[in-house]
């Protein structure tokens, strides 16, 4: 096929691909075509019109190229390949043309390379040519508009110089040549000293990891444990969510917006975001990774919130990170501005930034002071330091639609794997026997195992292991149990001369009350850091501080001056825990406040949650003297949920008795009734919103994350009667809980409640973080499951094995969907054994896994005499001829299977021939999907021939195989054979 025919027949695909890519990629394509004179300047101007949709410009380009014939199309395709390869020469070896009158022609001929070499130095170059009066200040300002990236600025400079003759062109060529001859080394020498100082500073800050209680510092590299880091499923990622290691976070995998600069790392409280942020700094500062960045500037949003004065970008980088020598400040800062791709800026804890993200206020001047919020927001948007990568860690709730527009790549922290839990514990205990005892305890206690998926709970289990082992059969079941255990551990650790019969909680009631009041007041005002005077004002004594729940904030405190000390709770979850304790144990807290705790409303998008910058002059208003209506109004939603969860958990039977014995609050019974009533009404409100089923469809409930939270609260209460009552009126056939952030801990709560369902339902948990541990937690309720959807959930062969051990015992179990997980040939063999024993499964979805030939063969052999399975998907499982041969043999004998999906594998013509032969005997199969395999005319002909002797099949799909256009046209005439896309 000629180049012209290739372009003409693929116009729709080319428009879709190019229009769906970045603007800069298309501009680089035009650069190549200009340099090869495929396009003239008139064409270029037509294809560079501002404000035109990219798709329209791409269509115009293709029309121009095809009109110019075969040679132009060939050059177009060559240029397209060069752009797709994204290969650029970074060395500055530019040889000026011997004839000065050819300078403009040289810039056009070498345009793609010149633009790439210029872009890192564009601001310096613009300054030089302005000084030589080759351009005007107005022209420079137009080129430097903040909407342009560095490469776009370089491109617009070349467009301008084309009209100014050979002398300015010659100057640009000489400038780049001179950079290559020594000026680059001079700039690098200036920066190397600052880089060394910055690395030394960051290394000292990141070398040690403080435990949550601040009681010890350990080498980060000795105890850092990899978290599951997941690229979430999106429209550009057809294989579903994918895991990624920390060292690869800056690569192109999972890119959602090539024009954006911000990498967003999301995780719930306690998932390890700050530790990961510290590990990035440590790896760079010690030279172990990320050395493509010349400078790294790390920030914590909790610290940035203290800044109240206007500040420039230069001051932010130097004052908050590291100062260079006075005489070099301007030169180094200019280098930073000129080389944004060599700079990494990180913001940890964006959810604790006291300003809701907005892109309403544009700030583009690196020298002009502005508010800290404007600085941070414009860095994220790219109005400041365009092309500089920014990493932002946050809890998910604060990420609004406006912020997502500027996200280059999104990653989710999903907690520890089963192996990660064990590794974490072993790294924290040098004694192998002690570590082994803790690991054994965690694995044998299902609820505890589910909690330890979250790093903060894993730390609690590790820290309080003596108390855990001493619990015997009464090991913690809930999140609240774990925090009460930690409370007792800290109190026992600091108590002297404690009598064996003395109640440790009762002895410290005033200290707990003081901590609780400070915690709740702080949450109500969006405050997480407290000055020494704030702490003293709330009545906390040195004895209270010695308990260890409030630790010195290293980001704020001057340890040598008492008045300059600042404190924060061990973790935000501990602040919520103490706030809940205060609301439950204090009789002066109005009952209406408790109702408000469980009847919160989502804040409107963009509403701020308070102002942490007030920390230095904090005046905590006593909570009891505030209007009750506004008591909890300003608490950030996720913190309110965590506090409410603890509030419910404190009323579990074991902890309730503990509270009564320790503090004897008068209103405890009434508070318990209020919480139970609020939870029951909340569940009923969700049930009442279920729409009626459409005709011939099952009645379905699409649950929101708030529903899952209500179930977690019920689980924390450990009230069996309440869990039965919660679902007694649930009249649905299908319960959908996709994208609800469900991990192993949530699975425990779901199973606790859903096991009381009156009849079997379908449970859809796609696109969560269930994992192998979560499957274990779900076991108590799966006997009531008719269909289980676990697509895109980090399930491996181990989780599948646990599931299939129980499947034969569940007569209601009809459907299982495990698409886009991590199931290999081992999992395929496990499934095969389960299919031999189970007589109820009718639908099995395994697309997007890696069962391969071995797994496919095992499944095929198990299905030869199977009478129940009617639908099977093995799409995208790396199945070749061995698996294809086994599947063909299965089709020859199987009398039940009605649909078989085998798209996106590696099946050959020989497999198509075998499958075609089996279809001549099979009288059950109705739909066969074989698109995007490796069939040629031979294989498709065999399938077409088989249709002549099989009247049961309604469709065979063979799109995307190795057929010419003419062959596709021929086969498209065959009835029931679908060839074209």
Image (cartoon, rainbow, N blue to C red):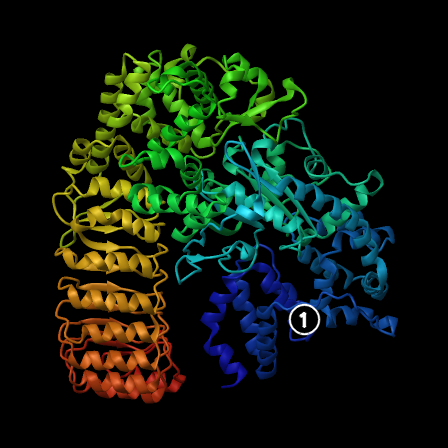
Q: Quadrant of the C terminus?
A: bottom left
Mark 1 nearby-residue class (10 Å; few <14, some 14–19, many ≥20): many
Residue, x 45% and y 22% (percent of image)? 519
Task: Give the quarter of the image for residue 630.
Answer: top left
Residue toward you, 917 or 893: 893
Which is nearer the eye, 312 or 694? Answer: 312
In the image, is 694 to the left or to the right of 912? left
Toward which corner of the image does residue 701 lie, by quadrant?
top left
Q: Residue 410, position in %: x, y?
A: 49, 51
Q: Is residue 761 visible?
A: no
- Tell which of 282 and 928 is nearer to you: 282
In the rendered image, the vertical position of residue 214 relative to residue 811, given as above or below: above
Where, by quadrant of the figure, is residue 684 drawn? top left
Describe residue 913's horizontal placement relative to residue 263 as left or right: left
Left or right: 706 as drawn, with respect to 326: left
Q: Residue at x 25, y 48 (%)?
A: 778
Q: Residue at x 64, y 69 (%)?
A: 87
Q: Position of residue 969 (x, y in %)?
A: 34, 84
Q: From this viewpoint, is residue 721 visible? A: yes
- Residue drawn at x 61%, y 22% is 565
Question: x, y (%) of residue 66?
Answer: 55, 77
Q: Is residue 349 left or right of residue 327?
A: left
**Which residue is labeled 1 in the image?**
34
Coordinates of residue 282 in the picture (x, y in percent): 62, 47
Assign a secondary structure to mark 1: helix
- Relative to residue 862, is residue 284 depicted above or below? above
């Amino acid at each position: 096929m000629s180049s012209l025919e290739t372009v003409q027949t693929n116009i729709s695909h080319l428009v879709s691909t190019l229009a769906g890519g970045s603007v800069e990629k298309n501009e680089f394509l035009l650069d190549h075509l200009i340099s090869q004179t495929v396009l003239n300047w008139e064409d270029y101007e037509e294809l560079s019109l501002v404000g035109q949709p990219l798709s329209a410009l791409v269509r115009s380009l293709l029309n121009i190229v095809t009109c110019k014939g075969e040679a132009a199309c060939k050059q177009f395709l060559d240029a397209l390949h060069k752009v797709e390869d994204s290969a650029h020469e970074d060395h500055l070896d530019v040889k000026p043309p011997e004839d000065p009158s050819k300078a403009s022609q040289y810039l056009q001929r070498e345009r793609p390379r010149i633009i790439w070499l210029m872009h890192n130095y564009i601001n310096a170059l613009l300054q030089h040519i302005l000084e030589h009066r080759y351009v005007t200040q107005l022209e420079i300002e137009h080129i430097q508009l903040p909407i342009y990236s560095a490469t776009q600025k370089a491109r617009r400079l070349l467009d301008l110089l084309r009209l100014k003759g050979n002398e300015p062109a010659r100057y640009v060529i000489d400038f780049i040549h001179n950079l290559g001859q020594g000026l680059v080394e001079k700039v690098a020498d200036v920066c190397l000293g600052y880089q060394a100082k910055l690395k030394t500073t960051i290394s000292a800050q990141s070398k040690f990891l403080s435990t949550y209680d601040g009681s010890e510092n350990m080498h980060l590299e000795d105890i850092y444990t990899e978290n599951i880091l997941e690229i979430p499923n999106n429209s550009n990622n057809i294989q579903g969510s994918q895991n990624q290691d920390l060292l690869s976070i800056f690569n192109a995998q999972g890119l959602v917006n090539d024009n954006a600069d911000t990498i967003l790392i999301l995780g719930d409280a306690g998932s390890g975001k700050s530790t990961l942020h510290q590990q990035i700094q440590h790896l760079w500062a010690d030279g172990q990774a990320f050395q493509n960045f010349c400078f790294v500037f790390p920030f914590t949003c909790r610290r940035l919130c203290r800044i109240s004065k206007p500040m420039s970008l230069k001051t932010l980088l130097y004052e908050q990170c590291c100062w260079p020598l006075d005489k070099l400040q301007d030169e180094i800062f200019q280098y930073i501005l000129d080389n944004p791709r060599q700079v990494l800026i990180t913001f940890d804890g964006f959810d604790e930034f006291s300003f809701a993200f907005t892109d309403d206020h544009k700030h583009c001047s690196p020298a002009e002071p502005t508010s800290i919020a404007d600085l941070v927001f414009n860095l994220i948007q790219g109005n400041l330091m365009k092309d500089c990568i920014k990493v932002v860690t946050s809890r998910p709730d604060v990420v609004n639609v406006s912020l997502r527009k500027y996200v280059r790549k999104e990653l989710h922290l999903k907690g520890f794997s089963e192996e990660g839990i064990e590794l974490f514990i072993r790294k924290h205990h040098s004694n192998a026997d002690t570590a082994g005892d803790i690991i054994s305890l965690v694995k044998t206690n299902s609820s505890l195992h589910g909690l330890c998926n979250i790093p903060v709970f894993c730390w609690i289990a590790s820290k309080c292991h003596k108390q855990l082992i001493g619990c015997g059969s009464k090991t913690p079941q809930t999140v609240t149990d774990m925090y009460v255990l930690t409370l007792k551990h800290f109190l026992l650790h600091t108590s002297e001369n404690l009598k064996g019969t003395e109640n440790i909680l009762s002895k410290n009631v005033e200290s707990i009350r003081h901590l609780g009041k400070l915690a709740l007041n702080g949450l109500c005002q969006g405050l997480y850091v407290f000055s020494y005077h704030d702490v003293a004002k709330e009545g906390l004594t040195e004895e209270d501080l010695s308990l260890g729940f409030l630790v010195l904030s290293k980001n704020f405190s001057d340890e040598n001056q008492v008045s300059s000390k600042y404190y924060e709770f061990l973790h935000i979850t501990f602040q919520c825990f103490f706030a809940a304790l205060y609301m439950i144990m204090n009789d002066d807290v109005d009952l209406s406040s408790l109702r408000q705790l469980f009847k919160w409303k989502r804040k409107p998008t963009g509403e701020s949650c308070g102002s942490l910058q007030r920390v230095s002059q904090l005046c905590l208003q006593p909570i009891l003297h505030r209007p009750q209506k506004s008591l909890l109004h300003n608490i950030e939603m996720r913190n309110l949920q965590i506090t409410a969860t603890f509030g419910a958990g404190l009323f579990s039977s074991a902890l309730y008795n503990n509270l009564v014995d320790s503090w004897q609050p008068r209103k405890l019974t009434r508070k318990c009734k209020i919480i139970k009533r609020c939870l029951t009404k909340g569940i009923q409100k969700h049930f009442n919103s279920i729409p009626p089923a459409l005709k011939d469809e099952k009645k379905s409930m699409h649950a929101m994350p708030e529903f899952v939270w209500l179930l977690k609260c019920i689980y924390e209460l450990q009230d069996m009667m309440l869990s039965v009552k919660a679902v007694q009126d649930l009249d649905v056939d299908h319960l959908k809980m996709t994208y609800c952030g469900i991990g192993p801990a949530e699975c425990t709560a779901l199973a606790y409640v859903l096991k009381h369902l009156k009849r079997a339902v379908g449970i859809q948990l796609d696109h969560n973080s269930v994992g192998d541990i979560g499957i274990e937690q779900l076991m108590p309720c799966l006997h009531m499951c008719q269909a289980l959807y676990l697509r895109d959930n980090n399930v491996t062969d181990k989780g599948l094995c646990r599931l299939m051990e129980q499947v034969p015992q569940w007569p209601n179990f009809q459907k299982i969907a495990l698409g886009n997980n991590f199931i290999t040939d081992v999992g395929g063999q496990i499934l095969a054994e389960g299919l031999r024993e189970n007589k109820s499964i009718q639908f099995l979805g395994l697309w997007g896994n890696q069962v391969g030939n071995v797994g496919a063969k095992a499944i095929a052999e198990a299905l030869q005499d199977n009478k129940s399975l009617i639908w099977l998907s093995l799409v995208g499982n790396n199945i070749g001829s061995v698996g294809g041969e086994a599947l063909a043999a299965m089709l020859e004998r199987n009398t039940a299977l009605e649909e078989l999906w085998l798209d996106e594998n590696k099946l050959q013509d020989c497999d198509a021939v075998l499958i075609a032969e089996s279809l001549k005997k099979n009288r059950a199969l109705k739909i066969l999907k074989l698109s995007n395999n490796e069939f040629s005319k031979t294989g498709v002909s065999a399938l077409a021939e088989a249709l002549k002797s099989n009247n049961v099949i309604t469709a065979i799909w063979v799109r995307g195989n190795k057929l010419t256009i003419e062959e596709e046209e021929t086969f498209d005439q065959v009835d029931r054979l679908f060839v074209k896309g």
